[in-house]
Image (tube, helix red, strand yellow):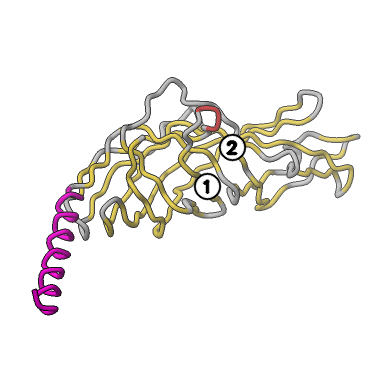
Amino acid sequence: MSSRTWKTAAFALAALLLSAGLAQAGTLVVDEGYNFLKTTPRSYTTVSIPQGFFGDKNGVPSDPIVNRVVELEGRPIGSLGLSPRSGVIVAAGNCHSKGGHEHCHAPSPLNADIDTITTIGGASIAKVGDTAEVTLQIVALSLQTPEKAPVEVTYGGKDPSYFRALVALDPSQSQPIGSIRLHRTKDDGGIMEVEMPVKFQVLFTGGRAERFGPVSLSTVLESDDNGFTVEAQ
């Protein structure tokens, strides 16, 4: 067989294998159900607290806190008896932020690490280049300030006390429905845009069983440049 014939045959075989691979990839299915997540570094919230919120020392009320950034880490709660979806969305560098709040997280394969649970709707994305939108709702959240980064409170500009902030969903309010817009750019994933409303509370705890709050807050966490893949779980 001539060199040209070999090249033609090789090209035809490569084209055949490529088309077979694309056909094998088929529809990308995102299953409806729960996602189990663990919070990762760079997560924070921002709080403003009025004067006197933390009581007083020797008759001097606590100073107000204005737009204080509070670092957060996971406070694991486990799966709460819920079952995971059979297909899980795995996002790369997944952080959602808005208005002084940011939550970064990754999928958690270990029950002991889970501190955030969301539920998403199902969708099928037929081919690369297609887009689908699924519902998103947060159903559990458990965060805290790290021991090394407590919230400092002063009284008349001195006599500091230190408190740990505990963050959880507001039990008095239902969580709104958000969305994930999935843009398929490869066989097993692509890019996603996220909008996740969160209504939450911050409770402050200190020594001698001190408890102040909770303070109710809300935000809509957003991101538009996270990559994702859909993997079996």
Q: Position of residue 201 (x, y in %)?
A: 56, 35
- For badge 1, the amino acid type reads His
In magenta stretch: residue 166: no
Residue beneath the point at 65% across and 51% down: 69
Of the 4 image quadrants, the one containing the C terminus is top left
Q: Quadrant of residue 216?
A: top right
In the rendered structure, the answer to whether residue 94 lies left or right of residue 232 reads right
Of the 4 image quadrants, the one containing the N terminus is bottom left
Q: Position of residue 128 (x, y in %)?
A: 21, 58
In the rendered structure, find residue 49 and report the number of the disc placed on it: none
- For badge 2, the amino acid type reads Gly
Q: Determine crowd level at label 1: few under 14, some 14-19, many 20+ residues with C-alpha closer than 10 A.
A: many
Q: Quadrant of residue 13?
A: bottom left
Residue beneath the point at 31% across and 52% down: 189
Q: Position of residue 147 (x, y in %)?
A: 74, 38
In the displayed structure, would residue 155 be above or below residue 186?
above
In the displayed structure, would residue 165 be above or below residue 8?
above
Q: Secondary structure at mark 2?
A: strand
In magenta stretch: residue 13: yes
- Please tell me whether mark 1 or mark 2 is closer to you in this view: 2
Residue beneath the point at 80% across and 28% down: 207
Q: Secondary structure at mark 1?
A: strand
In the rendered structure, find residue 103 and report the number of the disc placed on it: 1
- Residue nearest the observer in this picture, 218 or 167: 167
Q: Which residue is mark 2?
A: 74
In the displayed structure, would residue 45 be above or below residue 53?
below
Q: Which residue sits furthest front?
A: 1
Q: Main secondary structure of the magenta part?
A: helix
Circle 1/circle 2 CB separation < 8 Å? no
- Residue nearest the observer in this picture, 33 or 4: 4
Report the span colored magenta.
1-26
Q: Determine crowd level at label 2: few under 14, some 14-19, many 20+ residues with C-alpha closer than 10 A.
A: many
